[in-house]
Amino acid sequence: MLTLKEFKEARSVLSGVIRTTNLVYSDAFSRATGNHVYIKPENMQVTGAYKIRGAYYKISTLTEEEKARGLVTASAGNHAQGVAYAAQAAGVEATIVMPTTTPLVKVNNTKDLGAQVILHGETFDDAAELAAQLAQERGLTYVHPFNDPAVATGQGTISYEIFQDLPDVDIILVPIGGGGLATGVSTLAKLLNPNVMVIGVEPAGAASMKASLEAGHVVTMEHIETIADGVAVKTPGDQIFPYLQKNLDGILTIDDNELVDAFLDMMEKHKMIVENAGLLPIAALNHLDVKGKNVVTVLSGGNMDVITVASLVQHGLINRGRVFTFSVQLPDRPGELLRVASIVAQANGNIIKLEHNQFVNINRQSGVELRVTLEAFGHSHKRAILEAMQKEGYPARECHTNDFYT
C-alpha cells in the first residue's frame, strides 16, 4: 500500500539529487483552450526525464547484498539513464537492455553513465524478456521501469512539487505507458487532495492501459505502433494496476499526428524540446471539455535525437500547410519557369526547391512537369497560392506525397 509516509521518504531521498522543475505558465495554451495551463518541465530534469526519481529511490531501498549482485533493467531509454545514474552514484554495476529502435541519444547517454548496454528486440517488451532472463541466469537484481510500487513512489514526488507551486490545481494530465508515473502522480495527488482530477494520456497506437481499465484487468496488446517510444508498452504493470483503477479519473488517447503538431507548438511557443511521450499531455489539452480550470501538463522527458527532431519539424510544417509541394504542366518554352516563380512571389510564397522534368512525356511538345516545394503561412495561404496559379492559367495540383524529403 502506497502511503504518505513512503512518498515523504522518497522526497527526502531525492532531495539534492533531482532538480525541482517549477511549473511554467503557458499563455499560448491558456488562450487556446480557455483554461489556465501550466507546464511541468520534467524534460529539464537530471538525465532529461522524470525516470531518475523512481530509479534512484528504488535503488536506495535495496540491501547491500542486492546492490552487490549488480543491477539489470529493460528500458526504452529514460529509465535506462535513471538506473545508470543511480547505479554510478551507488558504485554498483548496471546492465541495461534496450530495444534496437531506441534513439541513439538515449543509448549513448546511458553508456556515458557507465552502464553496459545490450540492444535487443524491436519493443520494450522484447527487451524486458531478455532482462528478466539475465536477472535469473546471472543473479542480477532487476529494477523494473514501472511495475514496482517503490519505483512508482519515486515518480509520484512530482505531485508534491505541483501542489507546492499550484495548491489549487484542478486537473493533472500525465503520460501513461506501463503506468508507473501515472500511479505515483495520481496516488499522491489524491492523498493531498481527493478532489483533484488526474487523467492519463496514451497514444492511440499503444493504448494498452485504456484496454486494461476497460477490461477490469491487465491485458496484453498483440501489436503496438506509435512514435511515442517512451510509452510503447504492450502490457501494463499488474502490481500497480489496482492503484490506477482507484486513483485515475480517466484515459485520453492521442493520434501520432497530434504529437507532431504538439512538438511544433512546444518548439515555437516555449522553445522546448520535448520527446513524443512527453507531448501527450500537450496534445490532450484539445480534448478537455472544460473551461477556466487550472490544468497541469507533465512533460515527462526531452531525450530526442536530432534526426527525429528534424523529421518532426518537417512533418509539422507540412501538417500545418507551411510547407507544401505542387506540380504543374508547362509548355516547353523559355520563360515559363520564370513566370511561375513570379506568380508564387506575388502571392508571397517562398520557394524552397524546384524540379523541372523535361522527360515526363515522350513528346516534349505536350509539356514538361514542374514540381515546386515552397513555404506558406498556413492552409489558407496555401490555397491562395494555388488559386493564383489557376487564375494565371496554370492548374497546379498539390502533391500529397510531399517532395520535401527528397
Image: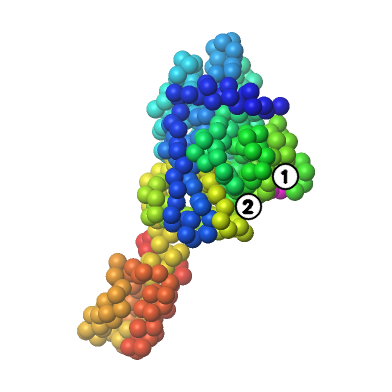
Q: Which residue is mark 1?
A: 212
Question: Relative to the observer, which residue lies in front, 216 or 245?
Answer: 245
Question: Relative to the observer, which residue lies in front, 323 or 394?
Answer: 323
Which percent across, then down, holds residue 132?
63, 27
Which percent across, then down, holds residue 9?
58, 21
Q: Is residue 209 magenta?
A: yes
Question: Relative to the observer, which residue lies in front, 304 or 19?
Answer: 19
Magenta segment range? 208-212
- Secondary structure beneath dot 2 equals strand
> Tag on residue 252?
2
Quadrant containing the C terminus is bottom left
Q: Could you tell me which residue is drawn at 47 percent across and 59 percent down?
A: 31
Question: Is residue 331 depicted above or below 116 in this figure?
Answer: below
Q: Is residue 234 magenta?
A: no
Residue 149 visible at all? yes
- Secondary structure beneath dot 1 equals helix
Which percent across, then down, holds residue 230?
53, 41
Q: Are circles 1 and 2 on residues that touch, CB within 8 Å? A: no
Quadrant containing the N terminus is top right
Q: Amino acid at mark 2?
A: Leu
In this view, the residue farthest toward the right is 216
Question: Relative to the observer, which residue lies in front, 141 or 59?
Answer: 59
Q: Could you tell me which residue is drawn at 53 percent across and 38 percent down?
A: 162
